[in-house]
Amino acid sequence: MKRYIFRVTLIIMLFLLIILVNLPFTEESEVKAFTLPGLPRPIAKVPVVITSAGQSTDTYIVNDISNQLMIRSFFMPQADGADIEDMNTIVFAVGYSSLGIKYQGISFEDEKTRIEKLISIAKDNGMTIITVVIGSEHSSNDKGEEILRLIGADTDYIIGLKGSDSEKILVDMAEKGDIPLTLVSKVNDISEPFASAFR
């Protein structure tokens, strides 16, 4: 009798374990399952132009990472159409800064127009578009999100920070556009996925 009770208890426990294992993932788990640690194969070629999308100082961080990795890149925070004609890849460091916009003597609409033109030229010339979102400055605002969504529809790869204000937007864009996405824990961790796009 004791053996029978033990067996029944064991079967019930196994059954409950199977149900538990097959329960739907939480939103956080889905995000982790969807993101990649890096690209499985390179998608981008040099030369590269690194430009700002929103005129925040994040562009300087991305440029430093590129230099450390010795990727042949050109740093042009205000790149225009002529600057990318002979390039194979364009990297947008996305981050809106009202101070940066003001310092450059342009309007938000001017910045959006510049970005749209760059995207159009990049697509026409078969360039790879990489989007890096650090969010170290003014990341939680409507204008920053507007710029991000402007680029996100056409980007080939997105790198962002876990737990940032932009994380949900990045995941949403990546899922809808079937775009590879890597979320890292800190800024220094951007190097590895960034390098994976080229090597």
Image (cartoon, helix red, strand yellow):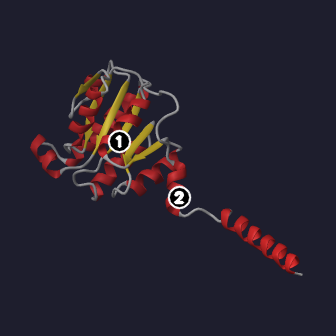
Counting residues from the N terminus, which is met first, the one under dot 2 or under dot 1?
A: 2
Q: Residue 110, position in %: x, y?
A: 22, 42
Residue at 26% from the left image edge and 27% from the top image edge: 67
Q: Position of residue 84 (x, y in %)?
A: 30, 24
SS for dot 1: helix
What mark, if any, has residue 172 been given in the picture? none
* Amino acid type assigned to the residue bearing label 2 in the image: Ser
Q: Residue at x 47, y 28 (%)?
A: 43
Which residue is nearer to you in this view: 32 or 119? 32
Question: Residue 115 at what x, y percent from top left?
Answer: 30, 38
Q: Which mark is residue 29?
A: 2
The answer to whether 98 appears left or right of 193 in the picture is left
Q: Quadrant of residue 197?
A: top left
Disc 2 from disc 1: Cα separation? 20 Å
Looking at numbered disc 1 in the image, what kind of residue is underneath it?
A: Asp
Task: Name the residue nearer the viewer: 100 or 39.
Answer: 39
Residue at the spot 89% in from the left edge and 81% down from the top edge: 1
For disc 1, the marked residue is 189
Instruction: Give the vertical position of 42 relative to 86 (above or below).
Output: below
Residue at the extreme bottom of the image, as rendered? 1
Front in this rendered view, residue 83 or 160: 160
Please tell me whether mark 2 sits on a helix, a strand or a loop.
helix
Question: Compared with residue 170, is residue 92 higher up or lower down, i.e. above or below?
Answer: above
Mark 1 and mark 2 in contact (Cβ < 8 Å)?
no
Q: Position of residue 191 (x, y in %)?
A: 34, 35
How would you rate the neighbour count of disc 2 (Cα within 10 Å): few for under 14, some for 14-19, many for 20 or more? few
Please tell me how crowded label 1 is: few (under 14), some (14-19), or many (20+) other residues with Cα within 10 Å: some
